[in-house]
Protein backbone atom coordinates (compact mmCIF):
# COMPACT_ATOMS: atom_id res chain seq x y z
CA UNK A 1 0.00 0.00 0.00
CA UNK A 2 1.38 3.35 -1.05
CA UNK A 3 2.22 5.85 1.65
CA UNK A 4 2.42 9.49 0.77
CA UNK A 5 3.50 12.21 3.17
CA UNK A 6 0.95 14.97 3.56
CA UNK A 7 1.94 18.04 1.55
CA UNK A 8 -0.69 20.60 2.37
CA UNK A 9 1.36 23.50 0.98
CA UNK A 10 2.73 21.83 -2.10
CA UNK A 11 -0.67 20.97 -3.56
CA UNK A 12 -1.54 24.64 -3.90
CA UNK A 13 1.86 26.33 -4.12
CA UNK A 14 1.94 26.11 -7.90
CA UNK A 15 -1.43 27.82 -8.25
CA UNK A 16 -0.53 30.54 -5.76
CA UNK A 17 2.69 31.29 -7.65
CA UNK A 18 0.73 31.46 -10.88
CA UNK A 19 -1.77 33.81 -9.25
CA UNK A 20 1.09 36.09 -8.25
CA UNK A 21 2.11 36.33 -11.91
CA UNK A 22 -1.49 37.18 -12.79
CA UNK A 23 -1.41 39.92 -10.14
CA UNK A 24 1.67 41.35 -11.81
CA UNK A 25 -0.03 41.14 -15.22
CA UNK A 26 -3.14 43.04 -14.20
CA UNK A 27 -1.05 45.22 -11.89
CA UNK A 28 0.89 46.40 -14.90
CA UNK A 29 -2.35 47.24 -16.71
CA UNK A 30 -3.67 49.13 -13.71
CA UNK A 31 -0.43 51.12 -13.61
CA UNK A 32 -1.00 52.01 -17.27
CA UNK A 33 -4.46 53.22 -16.26
CA UNK A 34 -3.01 55.18 -13.33
CA UNK A 35 -0.46 57.00 -15.47
CA UNK A 36 -2.99 58.06 -18.08
CA UNK A 37 -5.55 58.93 -15.41
CA UNK A 38 -3.07 61.32 -13.86
CA UNK A 39 -2.36 62.83 -17.26
CA UNK A 40 -5.94 63.07 -18.59
CA UNK A 41 -8.04 63.19 -15.43
CA UNK A 42 -10.84 65.38 -16.84
CA UNK A 43 -11.12 63.28 -20.02
CA UNK A 44 -11.26 60.07 -17.98
CA UNK A 45 -14.02 61.41 -15.77
CA UNK A 46 -15.97 62.50 -18.82
CA UNK A 47 -15.49 59.15 -20.53
CA UNK A 48 -16.54 57.33 -17.37
CA UNK A 49 -20.01 58.82 -17.73
CA UNK A 50 -20.57 56.54 -20.73
CA UNK A 51 -20.30 53.46 -18.54
CA UNK A 52 -23.35 51.87 -16.95
CA UNK A 53 -23.03 51.92 -13.15
CA UNK A 54 -25.92 49.52 -12.63
CA UNK A 55 -24.41 46.85 -14.88
CA UNK A 56 -21.01 47.33 -13.27
CA UNK A 57 -22.44 47.09 -9.76
CA UNK A 58 -24.51 44.03 -10.70
CA UNK A 59 -21.43 42.32 -12.06
CA UNK A 60 -19.56 43.14 -8.87
CA UNK A 61 -22.29 41.60 -6.72
CA UNK A 62 -22.51 38.58 -9.02
CA UNK A 63 -18.80 37.83 -8.71
CA UNK A 64 -18.77 38.36 -4.94
CA UNK A 65 -21.62 35.87 -4.51
CA UNK A 66 -19.94 33.41 -6.85
CA UNK A 67 -16.75 33.63 -4.77
CA UNK A 68 -18.84 32.80 -1.72
CA UNK A 69 -20.44 29.78 -3.41
CA UNK A 70 -17.04 28.48 -4.52
CA UNK A 71 -15.59 28.82 -1.01
CA UNK A 72 -18.71 27.18 0.46
CA UNK A 73 -18.35 24.33 -2.04
CA UNK A 74 -14.92 23.54 -0.63
CA UNK A 75 -16.36 23.47 2.90
CA UNK A 76 -19.12 21.18 1.61
CA UNK A 77 -16.61 18.76 0.07
CA UNK A 78 -14.58 18.77 3.28
CA UNK A 79 -17.72 17.84 5.22
CA UNK A 80 -18.56 15.15 2.67
CA UNK A 81 -21.67 16.92 1.43
CA UNK A 82 -20.85 16.24 -2.21
CA UNK A 83 -24.32 16.94 -3.60
CA UNK A 84 -24.35 20.34 -1.88
CA UNK A 85 -20.89 21.00 -3.31
CA UNK A 86 -22.10 20.17 -6.81
CA UNK A 87 -25.00 22.57 -6.42
CA UNK A 88 -22.74 25.34 -5.15
CA UNK A 89 -20.25 24.94 -7.98
CA UNK A 90 -23.11 24.81 -10.44
CA UNK A 91 -24.37 28.09 -8.99
CA UNK A 92 -20.89 29.63 -9.32
CA UNK A 93 -20.68 28.61 -12.98
CA UNK A 94 -24.15 29.99 -13.60
CA UNK A 95 -23.23 33.31 -11.98
CA UNK A 96 -20.08 33.47 -14.10
CA UNK A 97 -22.15 32.95 -17.23
CA UNK A 98 -24.57 35.70 -16.18
CA UNK A 99 -21.55 37.97 -15.76
CA UNK A 100 -20.48 37.24 -19.32
CA UNK A 101 -24.00 37.85 -20.65
CA UNK A 102 -24.01 41.23 -18.86
CA UNK A 103 -20.68 42.02 -20.45
CA UNK A 104 -22.07 41.10 -23.86
CA UNK A 105 -24.94 43.57 -23.47
CA UNK A 106 -22.69 46.20 -21.99
CA UNK A 107 -20.19 46.08 -24.83
CA UNK A 108 -23.09 45.86 -27.30
CA UNK A 109 -24.59 49.15 -26.06
CA UNK A 110 -21.24 50.81 -26.52
CA UNK A 111 -20.65 49.44 -29.99
CA UNK A 112 -24.02 50.91 -30.97
CA UNK A 113 -22.89 54.31 -29.75
CA UNK A 114 -19.73 54.03 -31.83
CA UNK A 115 -17.52 53.50 -28.80
CA UNK A 116 -15.24 50.71 -29.92
CA UNK A 117 -11.48 50.59 -30.54
CA UNK A 118 -10.64 52.36 -33.77
CA UNK A 119 -14.07 53.91 -34.25
CA UNK A 120 -14.42 57.41 -35.71
CA UNK A 121 -16.19 58.58 -32.57
CA UNK A 122 -13.24 57.64 -30.41
CA UNK A 123 -10.55 58.75 -32.85
CA UNK A 124 -12.20 62.18 -33.07
CA UNK A 125 -12.72 62.40 -29.32
CA UNK A 126 -10.34 63.88 -26.77
CA UNK A 127 -7.16 61.77 -26.48
CA UNK A 128 -7.91 60.95 -22.85
CA UNK A 129 -11.31 59.55 -23.77
CA UNK A 130 -9.80 57.41 -26.51
CA UNK A 131 -7.25 56.08 -24.00
CA UNK A 132 -9.93 55.42 -21.40
CA UNK A 133 -11.86 53.20 -23.77
CA UNK A 134 -8.74 51.49 -25.05
CA UNK A 135 -7.92 50.58 -21.46
CA UNK A 136 -11.54 49.67 -20.75
CA UNK A 137 -11.80 47.19 -23.59
CA UNK A 138 -8.37 45.70 -23.05
CA UNK A 139 -8.65 45.25 -19.29
CA UNK A 140 -12.25 44.07 -19.16
CA UNK A 141 -11.64 41.90 -22.24
CA UNK A 142 -8.63 40.23 -20.66
CA UNK A 143 -10.63 39.86 -17.46
CA UNK A 144 -13.47 38.25 -19.43
CA UNK A 145 -11.01 35.77 -20.89
CA UNK A 146 -9.96 34.92 -17.35
CA UNK A 147 -13.60 34.41 -16.43
CA UNK A 148 -13.85 31.86 -19.25
CA UNK A 149 -10.73 30.07 -18.03
CA UNK A 150 -12.10 30.09 -14.48
CA UNK A 151 -15.43 28.70 -15.65
CA UNK A 152 -13.58 25.92 -17.46
CA UNK A 153 -11.64 25.04 -14.32
CA UNK A 154 -14.79 25.06 -12.21
CA UNK A 155 -16.55 22.83 -14.75
CA UNK A 156 -13.67 20.35 -14.59
CA UNK A 157 -13.93 20.41 -10.79
CA UNK A 158 -17.66 19.78 -11.00
CA UNK A 159 -17.12 16.80 -13.27
CA UNK A 160 -14.46 15.47 -10.90
CA UNK A 161 -16.85 15.69 -7.95
CA UNK A 162 -19.52 13.86 -9.96
CA UNK A 163 -17.01 11.16 -10.88
CA UNK A 164 -15.89 10.98 -7.24
CA UNK A 165 -12.32 11.96 -8.09
CA UNK A 166 -12.65 14.74 -5.55
CA UNK A 167 -13.16 13.60 -1.98
CA UNK A 168 -13.04 15.17 1.44
CA UNK A 169 -9.41 14.13 1.82
CA UNK A 170 -8.39 14.86 -1.78
CA UNK A 171 -9.70 18.12 -3.23
CA UNK A 172 -6.67 20.00 -4.58
CA UNK A 173 -8.22 20.43 -8.05
CA UNK A 174 -11.28 22.11 -6.57
CA UNK A 175 -9.24 24.22 -4.20
CA UNK A 176 -6.91 25.45 -6.95
CA UNK A 177 -9.79 26.13 -9.32
CA UNK A 178 -11.39 28.08 -6.49
CA UNK A 179 -8.23 30.10 -5.97
CA UNK A 180 -8.19 31.03 -9.66
CA UNK A 181 -11.83 32.05 -9.50
CA UNK A 182 -11.21 34.22 -6.42
CA UNK A 183 -8.42 35.95 -8.28
CA UNK A 184 -10.80 36.77 -11.11
CA UNK A 185 -13.11 38.28 -8.48
CA UNK A 186 -10.18 40.18 -6.93
CA UNK A 187 -9.28 41.76 -10.26
CA UNK A 188 -12.86 42.88 -10.83
CA UNK A 189 -12.91 44.39 -7.32
CA UNK A 190 -10.31 46.84 -8.61
CA UNK A 191 -11.69 47.23 -12.14
CA UNK A 192 -15.08 48.31 -10.80
CA UNK A 193 -14.07 51.52 -8.96
CA UNK A 194 -11.47 52.52 -11.54
CA UNK A 195 -13.88 52.42 -14.46
CA UNK A 196 -17.38 52.79 -13.03
CA UNK A 197 -16.95 54.98 -9.98
CA UNK A 198 -14.82 57.88 -11.13
CA UNK A 199 -16.68 61.15 -10.68
CA UNK B 1 -2.68 5.94 0.62
CA UNK B 2 -2.40 8.37 3.49
CA UNK B 3 -4.85 11.25 3.08
CA UNK B 4 -2.94 14.33 2.05
CA UNK B 5 -5.32 17.10 3.12
CA UNK B 6 -6.98 15.63 6.18
CA UNK B 7 -5.95 18.00 8.89
CA UNK B 8 -6.53 21.37 7.33
CA UNK B 9 -8.75 24.07 8.72
CA UNK B 10 -12.29 24.22 7.29
CA UNK B 11 -14.03 27.60 7.13
CA UNK B 12 -17.62 27.36 8.33
CA UNK B 13 -20.54 28.41 6.10
CA UNK B 14 -21.45 31.04 8.68
CA UNK B 15 -18.08 32.69 8.57
CA UNK B 16 -18.04 32.63 4.75
CA UNK B 17 -21.50 34.18 4.64
CA UNK B 18 -20.46 36.87 7.12
CA UNK B 19 -17.52 37.73 4.87
CA UNK B 20 -19.89 37.96 1.89
CA UNK B 21 -22.10 40.37 3.84
CA UNK B 22 -19.09 42.52 4.70
CA UNK B 23 -18.10 42.56 1.03
CA UNK B 24 -21.59 43.59 -0.08
CA UNK B 25 -21.70 46.37 2.54
CA UNK B 26 -18.30 47.63 1.40
CA UNK B 27 -19.52 47.58 -2.21
CA UNK B 28 -22.57 49.65 -1.28
CA UNK B 29 -20.30 52.01 0.68
CA UNK B 30 -17.89 52.57 -2.18
CA UNK B 31 -20.73 53.26 -4.59
CA UNK B 32 -22.37 55.72 -2.18
CA UNK B 33 -19.14 57.57 -1.42
CA UNK B 34 -18.32 57.82 -5.12
CA UNK B 35 -21.50 59.81 -5.73
CA UNK B 36 -20.26 62.56 -3.37
CA UNK B 37 -17.75 64.95 -4.93
CA UNK B 38 -14.65 64.95 -2.74
CA UNK B 39 -12.30 66.00 -5.50
CA UNK B 40 -9.00 64.19 -5.69
CA UNK B 41 -9.85 62.20 -2.59
CA UNK B 42 -12.52 60.13 -4.40
CA UNK B 43 -10.19 57.81 -6.24
CA UNK B 44 -8.02 57.20 -3.18
CA UNK B 45 -11.03 56.30 -1.04
CA UNK B 46 -12.28 54.00 -3.79
CA UNK B 47 -8.92 52.25 -3.98
CA UNK B 48 -8.76 52.00 -0.19
CA UNK B 49 -12.18 50.36 0.04
CA UNK B 50 -11.28 48.06 -2.88
CA UNK B 51 -8.14 47.03 -0.97
CA UNK B 52 -10.24 46.15 2.07
CA UNK B 53 -12.55 44.05 -0.08
CA UNK B 54 -9.55 42.36 -1.66
CA UNK B 55 -8.13 41.64 1.79
CA UNK B 56 -11.33 39.90 2.87
CA UNK B 57 -11.42 37.78 -0.29
CA UNK B 58 -7.75 36.86 0.14
CA UNK B 59 -7.85 36.10 3.85
CA UNK B 60 -11.11 34.18 4.06
CA UNK B 61 -12.33 33.01 0.65
CA UNK B 62 -8.82 32.18 -0.50
CA UNK B 63 -7.99 30.90 2.97
CA UNK B 64 -4.74 32.90 3.18
CA UNK B 65 -5.31 33.68 6.87
CA UNK B 66 -4.94 30.00 7.69
CA UNK B 67 -2.19 29.17 5.24
CA UNK B 68 1.49 28.66 5.94
CA UNK B 69 3.95 31.49 6.34
CA UNK B 70 5.52 30.64 2.98
CA UNK B 71 2.40 31.57 1.04
CA UNK B 72 1.83 34.68 3.13
CA UNK B 73 5.39 35.91 2.64
CA UNK B 74 5.20 35.16 -1.08
CA UNK B 75 2.03 37.22 -1.32
CA UNK B 76 3.54 40.15 0.56
CA UNK B 77 6.53 39.89 -1.73
CA UNK B 78 4.30 40.14 -4.79
CA UNK B 79 2.61 43.24 -3.43
CA UNK B 80 6.03 44.65 -2.60
CA UNK B 81 7.12 44.12 -6.21
CA UNK B 82 4.01 45.88 -7.43
CA UNK B 83 4.58 48.74 -4.99
CA UNK B 84 8.11 49.23 -6.30
CA UNK B 85 6.78 49.07 -9.88
CA UNK B 86 4.13 51.72 -9.15
CA UNK B 87 6.47 53.90 -7.14
CA UNK B 88 9.20 53.96 -9.75
CA UNK B 89 6.79 54.62 -12.63
CA UNK B 90 5.33 57.66 -10.91
CA UNK B 91 8.79 58.79 -9.86
CA UNK B 92 9.71 58.62 -13.52
CA UNK B 93 6.72 60.38 -15.03
CA UNK B 94 6.72 63.10 -12.37
CA UNK B 95 9.91 64.51 -13.85
CA UNK B 96 9.16 64.31 -17.53
Image (tube, helix red, strand yellow):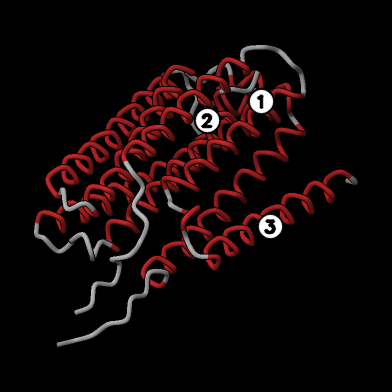
Instruction: State the residue at coordinates (9%, 59%).
Output: A163
- The numbered mark at residue A44 is 1
Marks 2 and 3 sit apart, C-alpha to C-alpha, by 23 Å
Answer with left or right where residue B58 lies relative to residue A31: left
Q: Residues within 10 Å of mark 3 (few under 14, many from 20)?
A: few
Figure check: A106 above or below A160: above
Q: Which residue is mark 2?
A: A192
Asked which quadrant contains residue B31, the reply is top right
Task: Compare residues A114 and A39 and report the one nearer the observer.
Answer: A39
- Specify the subunit that label 3 lies on: B
Residue A136 percent location from the top left of the image:
53, 34
Instruction: State the residue at coordinates (34%, 24%).
Output: A105
Marks 1 and 3 sit apart, C-alpha to C-alpha, by 28 Å
Labels 2 and 1 positioned on one and the same chain: yes
Q: Which residue is mark 3?
A: B80
Which mark is nearer the camera, 2 or 3?
Answer: 3
Marks 2 and 1 sit apart, C-alpha to C-alpha, by 14 Å
Residue A176 percent location from the top left of the image:
35, 59
- The numbered mark at residue A106 is none
Asked whether the residues under the numbered discs 2 and 3 touch, taking CB atoms below 8 Å apart as contact, a structural biologist would say no
Figure check: A26 above or below B44: below
Amino acid sequence: MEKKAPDKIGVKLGMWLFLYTEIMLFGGLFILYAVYYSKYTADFIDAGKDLDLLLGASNTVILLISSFTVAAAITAVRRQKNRLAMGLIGASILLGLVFLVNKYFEWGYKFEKGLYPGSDVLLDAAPGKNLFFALYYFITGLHGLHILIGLTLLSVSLIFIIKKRIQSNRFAVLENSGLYWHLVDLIWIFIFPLFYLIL
Amino acid sequence: MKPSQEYEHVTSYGKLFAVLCVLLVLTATTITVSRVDLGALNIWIAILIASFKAAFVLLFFMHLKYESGLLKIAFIGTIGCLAVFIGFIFWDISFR
